[in-house]
Amino acid sequence: MSPSFVIDASVILAWHDPREYNAYAEGVLDCLEKEMAITPPLCCFEVNNIFRLFEKKELITSLDSEKGIAFINNLPILRDGTSIEFSMPLVMRLSREHGLTIYDACYLELAVRLNLPLASLDNELLKAAKASGIEIKTPKTHEE
């Protein structure tokens, strides 16, 4: 099975943060029952960093983090293996063009390079994706 969309850390983390959880995030999670997503390797660091911040703020325990990471690791989410040297020129260009952080531009670069829809909760990234001709992943929600 090959990936059918790019997913960013905002969606993945929404599954673990009741303050951010919403129908869109739930719909993307449902999509993973039949589809595979892809993400840049950076996503692993972003997700782990947020879990660690949640621990420091005592919002979750280390066991909660471990369970969350195990849950994510068992999902059909592929980590892109393209070399940084290959992807960074486009990441830099997209960052400049759309005023994105390098981190967000990594997700957009992957979507552009693979011509895949993007699943994100980040409004600036979604705006840049639309401007770049990238489709936004629109799963059916439980409200439909």
Image (spheres, rainbow, N blue to C red):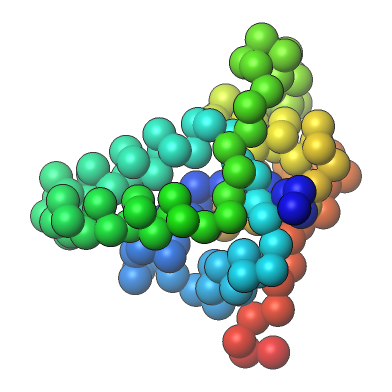
Residue that sits furthest to the front in the current view: 1
| Residue 28 visible (yes or no) | no
Residue that sits furthest to the top in the current view: 85
Q: Nearer the viewer, residue 77 or 104?
A: 77
Which image quadrant is residue 27 in?
Answer: bottom right
Left/right of residue 142 with respect to residue 129 in the rendered view: left
Q: Residue at x 71, y 34 (%)?
A: 110
Q: Position of residue 118 (x, y in %)?
A: 71, 51
Q: Residue at x 54, y 73 (%)?
A: 26
| Residue 89 visible (yes or no) | yes
Which image quadrant is residue 15 in?
Answer: bottom left
Q: Position of residue 76 (x, y in %)?
A: 58, 55
Which image quadrant is residue 50 in?
Answer: top left
Q: Position of residue 108 (x, y in %)?
A: 70, 37
Residue that sits furthest to the right in the current view: 133
Placement of 143 over or under 41, stated as above or below: below
Placement of 115 over or under 36, stated as above or below: above
Q: Position of residue 117 (x, y in %)?
A: 77, 52
Query: Where's the C terminus, which quadrant?
Result: bottom right
Q: Residue at x 63, y 27 (%)?
A: 81
Q: Nearer the viewer, residue 43 or 69?
A: 69
Left/right of residue 119 with respect to residue 130 in the rendered view: left
Q: Residue at x 52, y 57 (%)?
A: 75
